């Protein structure tokens, strides 16, 4: 399977779950905060409906929570690894401030991406490929 047509690529780039070519979001740049959450109502390539029913994307909050927990675990593992190889001095119980500072910074930087990818994952769970 080539990367340009893979499901993982279309998930990460928030493409249509049906045809892998149409955009889920109006603005492709996740960091334009004014239009970050605006979604297309239908796919411009295959006409797949993205607005299933009112409140459909509330379930994406569970996916977002799981991605956020994974990010916090990755921060803890990274800080512990950097401590083990001697790059930083980090002990979880003695440097909670370091953990929280790095974690909150990563969360703020990744929040628009987590929001979009969680919606992309959520709609993929309910769209059957033809």
Image (cartoon, rainbow, N blue to C red):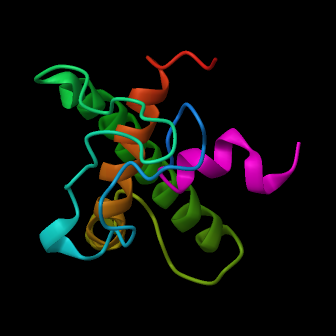
Q: With respect to residue 99, does 124 lie above or below? A: above
Image quarter of the C terminus: top right
Q: Which residue ends up furthest to the bottom in the rendered image?
A: 87
Dominant SS type (magenta): helix
Residue at left offset 52%, top offset 54%: 74
- Please name the residue shown 43% across and 17% down the image: 126
The single residue placed furthest to the right in the displayed view is: 1
In percent of width and height, residue 69 lies at 38, 42
Q: Is residue 57 left or right of residue 77?
A: left
Q: How far from the left and from the top, in percent, is residue 86?
A: 66, 80
Magenta span has 100? no
Q: Based on the displayed image, in which of its 4 quarters is residue 122 positioned?
A: top left
**Picture quarter containing residue 6?**
top right
Residue at x-position 18% and y-position 72%: 33
Nearest the viewer among 27 and 122 is 27
Left or right: 116 as drawn, with respect to 77 = left
Seen from the viewer's position, the closer of residues 99 and 9 is: 9
Report if residue 8 lies within the magenta region. Answer: yes
In terms of image quadrants, where is residue 62? top left
> How many marks are shown on the rendered structure?
0
Tell which of 76 and 112 is nearer to you: 112
Magenta highlight range: 1-14
**Residue 70, position as x, y percentages in the image:** 46, 44
Task: Kindly identify the residue that appears in the image at 28 percent across and 48 percent down.
Answer: 40
Specify the quadrant that holds the N terminus. top right
Q: Is residue 112 left or right of residue 67?
A: left
């Amino acid at each position: 399977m080539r990367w340009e047509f893979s499901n993982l690529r279309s998930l990460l780039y928030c493409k249509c779950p049906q045809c892998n070519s149409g955009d889920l979001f109006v603005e492709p740049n996740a960091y334009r905060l004014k239009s970050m959450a605006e979604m297309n109502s239908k796919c411009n390539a295959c006409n797949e409906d993205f607005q299933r029913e009112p409140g459909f994307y509330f379930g994406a909050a569970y996916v977002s929570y799981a991605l956020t927990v994974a990010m916090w675990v990755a921060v803890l593992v990274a800080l512990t690894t950097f401590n083990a190889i001697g790059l930083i001095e980090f002990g979880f119980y003695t440097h909670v401030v370091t953990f929280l500072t790095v974690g909150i910074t990563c969360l703020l930087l990744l929040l628009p991406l987590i929001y979009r990818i969680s919606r992309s994952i959520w709609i993929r769970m309910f769209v059957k490929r033809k």
